[in-house]
Amino acid sequence: MTSTPQPLTWTKPMRRCARCGEQRPDGFPKPVRSGQRRGARVGGADCGERDVIAKGWSRMSNDLKLGWSYKKLDELGFVGRGRSRHRPRNHPSLYGGPYPFFQTGDVKAAEFYLSDYSQTYNEKGLAQSKLWEPGTLCITIAANIAESAILKIKGCFPDNIVGFVADPDKADVRFVKYAIDTMKLRMQSISRGTTQDNLSLDKLLTFDFLTPPLPTQRKIAAILSAYDDLIENNTRRIAILEEMARLLYREWFVHFRFPGHEQVAMVDSELGPIPEGWEVVKLGSIADNEDMQRLLEEAELDDVQETALARVFSDEYQVITRDDRLEKVAEDIVSHFVNRGYPGKAMIVSIDKLTTMRMYDRVQKYWHHTLDDWRAQLAAALPEARDALAKKIEFMETTDMAVVLSQEQGEVEKFREKGLDIVPHRQRMMTEDLDEKFKDPDDPFRLVFVCAMWRTGFDVPSCSTIYLDRPMRNHTLMQTIARANRVFGEKVNGLIVDYVGIFRDLQRALAIYGTGPDGQIQEGEEPIEDKDALVERLRETIAEAEAFCADRGVDLEPILQSEGFQRIALMDAALSQLVEAQAEAALDDSVERIIVNDELKSRYLALAGEVDRLFKAILPDTRAGEFSPRRKVFVVLADKIRGLAAPADITEVMGAVEDLLDESVEAKEYVIREPGVFYDLSKVDFEALRQHFEQGRKRTEAEKLRSTVSAKLRRMVRLNRSRMNYLEEFQRIIDEYNAGSRNVEEFFEALVEFARRLNEEDQRAIAENLSEEELAVFDILTRPDLNLTEKEKRAVKQAAHDLLETLKREKLVLDWRKRQQSRAAVRVLIEELIWQLPERYTDKMCQQKSAQIYQHIYDNYWGPERSIYAMTA
């Protein structure tokens, strides 16, 4: 039994007006449930100023009268779990009959209605299950959580799917499906925490659904489902057109019943009768095995197709699937995968299912061979090489890999006959959410083996490498390549490793998408390049970076020839610990010449970053050694320039994260680069700083001071927006320096003077006897200057203090910004206290200050003990 929520009634409590002393209705009615003794006061109104709040509550109470109410799922119809009693559930004796068997993956893949399935039950399978009627809403509660679709045909499903049959007098099943969709994230969030996500029927039945009367449900569902119906109809039409194309091809080119065939004589050939004028030739003389590629473009190869493939294309198929060749390919894949510069995810695409399984076994073998070799090397490695090797070993030890193949009848026996065991792989495919794991860039599932699945329509931006070991063409080739070509993080490019010469068909594939005449590829359109082009681009970028440095008077040779620099190039350790004094000085002089202004500094950092990204992109190419020393110079110089910047202030980012994270989500630790030596403006001796400036590298010292001032100013403005005038002045100083209006000495003097005044502003809260957050409210209330008396200032300070204390104690509840009632309560409390300010504040001023204070609170306070001030304390 589920309890029905008690009806809400609304009372209008009275209280004495703070200004006129009359009894007035409180601004917010208090919700009181039956049997509840009292409710907490939410807010108050004075002198009729709060009519708008009462109107808001009137609208809310009217909504309740419209007949909307909260219902549990089992109050709207029958709810029951699917059945699959037999153990093991995947026993072959249950399958292969006429009864559709839907699984969670089928529900997830459905657009709205569920009619596609990958397995069927026979009579034995049906006897241990249940056949559900069309119109049943299927809701997944394990593996894939809270996915839903409406059965369009009769079908069975296991107990990790819940069936809902709507009561025709209470619910429209389409409306319930949309309601489930809106609550999916909530359902998924309470399903985590076990080894496998699980919602359970009991948890599902705890959710309340805001449900309108049945006619309203039908109207809402009709509007929304019109779009889903359109999608389904178009999908069905596409399938029909594809089938028509296949039938037309068969009719014309297999049965030779093409238009006008009656007038064409048939002649004998070695293949049998063919139309006169046609000829039988070797396939390789007219095409690059296009028929083979066409067969491979089918979603999967069944037994008949594989037999035909092996018979018609026996030479090429046998070459591709030879054991000795697969051994070499697997060995190369392992060597390449673990030595790449960007460690993204990768797909291995094989010619068929059996070869996919064989490739997995061979990659596993060479994976463990490599891991054993590296472990042996680690024991004898020099100290400077141990860290890099240990990271590679850790990467290999934590990498997960899996096979993903579509299911077919009798597959266990088929693979067993070939000496392969698909059962453990199928169990992973059925019990784990492999597609979501592969999409997650932080999940260790980094290497997937496929032959047809996931090659098209599967978006994984972190996938950086595709190993192609099967013929493909046209749109299938383009879509497969696109899996690796999404922009993501530090990934410069996707890498396609071609083992079958597939790029002989690339120009034809690209012609489909070309915009030039006759579909030709115009200059700049081709998204695929040979790796030689990438190497050449790296060489050109290094030359450009060297030319940039030469124009600035930067000589790289003393750095390159330094023994210390060679050590850092080999060991990749800290510059200050490994580079000789001569190289250190050369680096510092180089930095001094580069940071003339922001434009030059940004240009150099962009060039150095491009060199570094391209260098990583060509790894593990043997030609990388040619570029390694110069790449290291550019990277070290860039690090030193960035080191002049003050540590990043992530307070604002943290605030945004706080606003987005659900309580059940664990935030990851922020990692900040170790900073260099910077000034503490509150303790700096400006005269000593001037002397250091005169004796040292002036641009470097000015850059350090600028970065320190910038970091402090950003923090101060974030805490108090009234300081925006300081930010504008600071930017003006920088712009004048970049434009050449100030030389480096004048720039430094302007920064010193600005830093003095910034220190004074930073101490103002202490002088006013206020906290930083109280000062922000005080500034909003008193600016522009109102010429307040000292007594009035004390009253305003007290109001700022009382406002923040009351808000934090009573109103700033969890997620208050997401709830209309909570936002209104905050707004009312602000207005209530603002109207108690001194008489100097007019009604118009009170309204303006109320709006400004509310916006300030909304921007900077997210919940209990969650604010910009709590984070910077």
Image (cartoon, rainbow, N blue to C red):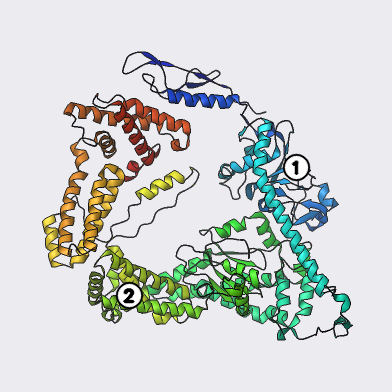
Whether residue 369 is visible to the viewer of this picture, yes or no, is: no
State the image quarter where residue 14 is shown.
top left
Tell which of 379 and 49 is nearer to you.
Answer: 49
User: Callout 2 environment at 10 Å: few (<14), some (14 to 19), or many (20+)?
Assistant: many
Answer above or below: position of 658 versus 786. Answer: below
Pointer 1: residues within 10 angstroms few (<14), some, or many (20+)? many
Q: Can you say whether 781 is above or below 630 in the image?
A: above
Furthest residue to the top?
22
The image's mark for residue 467 is none
From the top left corner, tell me how far across and down residue 519 is, in percent. Answer: 60, 73
Residue holding disc 1? 135
Image quadrant holding the N terminus, namely: top right
The kind of residue on which mark 1 rests is Gly
Left or right of 596, for residue 422: right
| Count of marks placed on residues | 2
Whether residue 794 is situated above or below residue 150 in the rendered picture: above
* Residue drawn at 72 percent across, 72 percent down: 294
Closer-to-camera residue (651/573): 651
Horizontal placement of 728 versus 120: left or right? Answer: left
Residue 475 position within the rendered picture, expressed as x and y whole percent measured from the top left: 64, 69
Q: Nearer the viewer, residue 329 or 148?
A: 148
Image-quadrant location for residue 200:
top right
Answer whether residue 173 is visible to the viewer in this image: yes
At 76% from the left and 66% from the top, the residue drawn is 245
Q: CA distance from mark 2 to mark 1?
A: 67 Å
Helix, strand, or loop for circle 2? helix
Comes first in the chain, label 2 or label 1: 1
Check the picture and name the quadrant holding the C terminus. Answer: top left
Task: Residue 594 in the image: state x and y as whole percent.
Answer: 26, 70
Look at mark 2 in the image and give the residue it sits on.
Answer: 633
Q: Amino acid at mark 2?
A: Val
Name the secondary structure under disc 1.
loop
